[in-house]
Amino acid sequence: MINVLKVIIRPFGLFESDLQRLSERIFEFVYCNVFLVLGGAVSIRKAVVNELYRRLPKKKFKVVDLSENALAELMRSLGMETDCQKSTWSN
């Protein structure tokens, strides 16, 4: 794996000191809340879902995405059951 810090010529991560200083507050915030990620099967939001699941796999969070295939792929990548709950919109 490439050491990105060497590539960008930095001795440490840009937010490393903030993350260390605020780690307890961040943990409390993440642990005490439930998250809803809209469009969560693509791009940056997929990375957020991966981080939430990696840090707190038993934590409840909901992911909503229009693409059922992308959502199923996300669930497989997390090692979750692909038993999706489908919702239908009605007036």
Image (tube, rainbow, N blue to C red):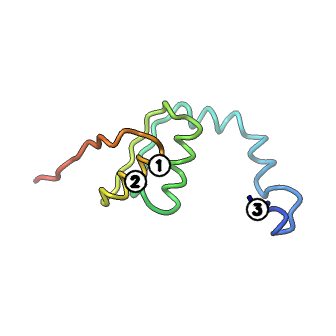
Residue name at image x 43 percent, y 54 percent: 40
Residue name at image x 36 percent, y 53 percent: 71
* Left or right of residue 11, residue 43 in this image: left
Residue count near mark 2 (Cα–Cα under 10 Å), binned few <14, some 14–19, many ≥20:
some
Q: Do the residues labelled 2 and 1 touch (CB within 8 Å)?
A: yes
* Mark 2 lies on residue: 73
Residue 9: quadrant of the picture: bottom right
Q: Which residue lies furthest to the left in this view?
A: 91
How far apart are the alpha carbons under marks 3 and 2?
26 Å
Q: Is mark 1 on a helix, strand or loop?
A: helix
* Left or right of residue 88, residue 1 in this image: right
How far apart are the alpha carbons under marks 2 and 1?
6 Å
* Mark 1 lies on residue: 77
Tell me the quadrant of the picture where the N terminus can be found: bottom right
Hey, what amino acid is under mark 3? Ile
Q: Position of residue 39 (x, y in %)?
A: 39, 58
How far apart are the alpha carbons under marks 1 and 3?
22 Å
Hey, what amino acid is under mark 1? Ser
Residue name at image x 53 percent, y 51 percent: 48
Q: Pick whichever, 91 or 54, lies toward us.
A: 54
Dot 1 or dot 3, earlier in sequence: 3
Q: Pick whichever, 78 or 35, lies toward us.
A: 78
* Mark 3 lies on residue: 2
